[in-house]
Amino acid sequence: MIDGAAINVLDYGADPTNTTDSASAIQAALNATLSTGGTVYFPYGTYKVGTTLKISKHNQVIYGNNSAIVFTGTGYAIDSDLVGGTIFPQYLQMQDFYIAVSSAATGGIKYRFSYGWIKNVTVQIPTSGQTGWFIDSNGTGSYYNTFENCGVNGYTNGTTVVNQKGFSFESGSVAPNANVFIGGRISAVKLPWAIYGYRNLLLGVTVEGTADTGTVFTIGNTLFPLSTGYNQIVNPYLEGGPGTRVYNIASGYYNKLDNIFATSMAGGPASLDNGIGTTIMSEYGYKFPNVDRSTDPEFLDWYEEGTWTPTLSASGGGAATYTSRQGSYTQIGNRMYIQGYLLLSNVGTLSGNLTINIPLIAAVGVPQVSSINFSRATGITAAGSSVITAEIGMTATSMSLYGSTLGTGVFTALTAATLSNTTEIAFSGFYQV
């Protein structure tokens, strides 16, 4: 039911049978609303439109009644004009349309509105060079819009397309901000989402059938790296094909992807991330941002697991050979936990005081003498080596080894001369980074 007086496009000569061009009639109906806005109603049908429909008033309400608009012109099927020559329209409401775009290098909706509410609108773009929704900046950034259950249908599987986008945000120095996309489905589109701007939220969107090598979400523009940040993609359902990337973050700050469910996307890299502070949480776990750690002691902002190859070095140079070496680490915040193992096959040419490399440079601070424990230290021949410990100094890249006779409490530097060709060392502990 429509409250109040509504303008019916049929009263202005629109044809719902897809026989004659209804662009002029529909435009006349849109223009006939009051200067302060009004309601335009499309009785169910299919409307051929050969030129772009322009919305040029605030507070327009457009009901499609599940009608289809078949756009045969150039440019976009729906666009806007400045209101009074100063500002693009605000408070647009539009719902229940299917917009089919036929020609290459055309698009469905060039969206330059703010404070709008769009519901149940899908655009079909079957060929190359087409864009379903172009979310324009309108000079200051299209902002505070809500898109509910809006989507894009693309090409038929097996068709080769290029430069085809589902939702594409303006990527200039000013980009769309604070828009919300709830639900909606994009099917078989080359690049489903190209996201720029600040604090846009995608909630429960679905992307299916991106069957060729492509990317589901592209975030940021390297030409304008400061124009994108704090966007969130929450609970997306992604079903792609061989080689499909989940996301490619080209630039931007503190963008967040939460609870990603992705299936049928094997065969290509999961992601590319050149942004700052990206956080990722999928069904497999949580990825912390790749930024400097916070100085706030109550703020956990880093977790990483990895391996490295422990190597003995000596102050006088030289090198040893090994039967086996392995090392693993877990970094939580600014605490690095390490485990390492070395089994020598030959001491080689090592000479001088001994060190073992560590995975990441140590923090500035007091040397950490007792944080590394040696569970095995065999084949070390010199007296005074019954107890081994290590010191990791400020900004160190390795730990220095020390030995002591049990019970004396006196430690001296462990040298290469104490090693044998069967030396075996196992250690674990932690240090600050």
Image: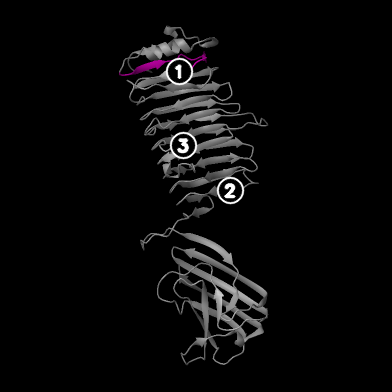
Where is mark 2, residue-wise? 270
Q: Which of marks 2 and 1 is nearer the N terminus?
A: 1
Q: Which residue is drawn at 48% across and 60% down?
A: 303
Q: Which residue is drawn at 43% across and 11% down?
A: 9
Where is mark 1, residue-wise? 53
Magenta residues, start to end: 36-52
Q: Where on the picture, by quarter, is residue 207?
A: top right
Circle 1: element type = strand
> How would you rate the neighbour count of disc 1 (Cα within 10 Å): few for under 14, some for 14-19, many for 20 or more?
many
Q: Residue at x 56, y 63 (%)?
A: 306
Where is mark 3, residue-wise? 171
Name the amino acid type tagged 3: Ser
Q: Which of marks 2 and 1 is in front?
A: 1
Q: Do the residues labelled 3 and 2 touch (CB within 8 Å)?
A: no
Circle 2: element type = loop
Q: Between 222 and 425, which is closer to the camera in this rendering?
A: 222
Q: Earlier in the sequence, mark 3 or mark 2?
A: 3
- Asked if residue 118 is positioned above or below residue 225 in the image, the reply reads above
Residue 304, how many percent across, how many down?
A: 51, 60
Q: Which of marks 3 and 1 is in front?
A: 3
Q: Is residue 122 magenta?
A: no
